[in-house]
Image: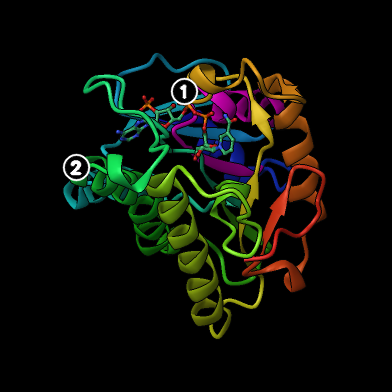
Amino acid sequence: MNTNIIANNDNNFSKNILILGGADGIGFAISKVYEKLNYNIYVTSRNKHKDSNNIKYFILEATKENSWLDLKEKFNKDNIVFDIILNTIGILHDEVNNIYPEKSIKNMDINFFMKNMEINSLVSALCIKHMIEFISKNNRTVIASLTARLGSISDNNIGGWLSYRASKAAQHMIIKTASIELSRNYNNLIIIGLHPGTVSTKLSKPYIKSAKNVFEPKYSARKLVSVIEKLDYTSTGKVFDYSGKIIPY
Ligand SMILES: NC(=O)c1ccc[n+]([C@@H]2O[C@H](COP(=O)([O-])OP(=O)(O)OC[C@H]3O[C@@H](n4cnc5c(N)ncnc54)[C@H](OP(=O)(O)O)[C@@H]3O)[C@@H](O)[C@H]2O)c1
């Protein structure tokens, strides 16, 4: 029997957060902040991890519908209701195939483009599609996806990194579109995008040597949690940076 769930059902102060891709990088740092806030933490990863204290791990291949159905079966058994659902899954390069973001459209590779769309955009849509069953209509709920300022069309002044930019712009459209539709039935649901800043993780490692203002994951995580905590119903459908400023589409 899952004692975390019992604690949650019996104790109004104990909230549940789901972090997709939360075994590493910014997602992991965010899980540590919510652990200190006494949340029950549910993390998905493609790989097996051992549960620890308040953190329970689940396997998810987030681009596969069947894997979502398996996950839902587990959450259904536990009657779980999430207060926060955070998608931190994303890619910028493909180390296995040695493909890095395009400096020119001439270098564009179809498989790399499609992989960016699949992991950075499609997963955000699948997350909302499947996890909407695990939120309450009465309680304030946040569904947030880590995105990037680079996905802003109006803020794009230097070009480059076509596949990543296109996939993050598509992610913004998914957030906006889902927020409009779901606000009709879920008055307390806030669906947003969050830009974490430039953060030292395996995703950013090849690019940050020359970057200014590189954050440690812990710092970015604390800033993002503080943004999440301040959101209200007027925030839905928007993209915010780590300091709470709106990023235009
Ligand atoms: N780091 C930055 O400077 C920065 C800047 C702007 C935006 N962001 C955004 O922030 C998010 C998190 O980035 P991060 O820096 O924390 O990266 P990260 O350390 O590489 O973590 C990303 C997570 O995505 C999951 N993932 C990677 N490839 C996947 C795949 N093919 N299929 C399914 N899941 C996959 C991994 O989970 P498992 O391996 O456990 O499955 C991993 O934990 C991304 O959306 C990124 O675009 C980051």
Ligand 1 closer than 8 Å to label 1 CB: yes
- 20 within the magenta span: yes
Q: From the viewer's perspective, is residue 168 above or below residue 235?
A: above
Mark seen at residue 111: 2
Ligand 1 closer than 8 Å to label 2 CB: no
Q: Nearer the viewer, residue 133 or 150?
A: 150
Residue ID for mark 1: 23
Q: Between tags 1 and 2, which lies in front?
A: 2
Query: Where is residue 32 drawn, in percent x and y?
Result: 65, 23
Residue 55 visible here: yes
Count of numbered labels shown in the rendering: 2
Q: From the viewer's perspective, is residue 171 above or below residue 187?
A: above
Q: From the viewer's perspective, is residue 111 above or below residue 210?
A: below
Q: Nearer the viewer, residue 79 or 243?
A: 243
Query: Where is residue 218 drawn, in percent x and y?
Result: 71, 21
Q: Quadrant of the C terminus?
A: bottom right
Q: Nearer the viewer, residue 137 or 4?
A: 137
State the extent of the magenta-drawn residues as a range. Answer: 15-35
Which residue occupies the extreme bottom position in the image? 184
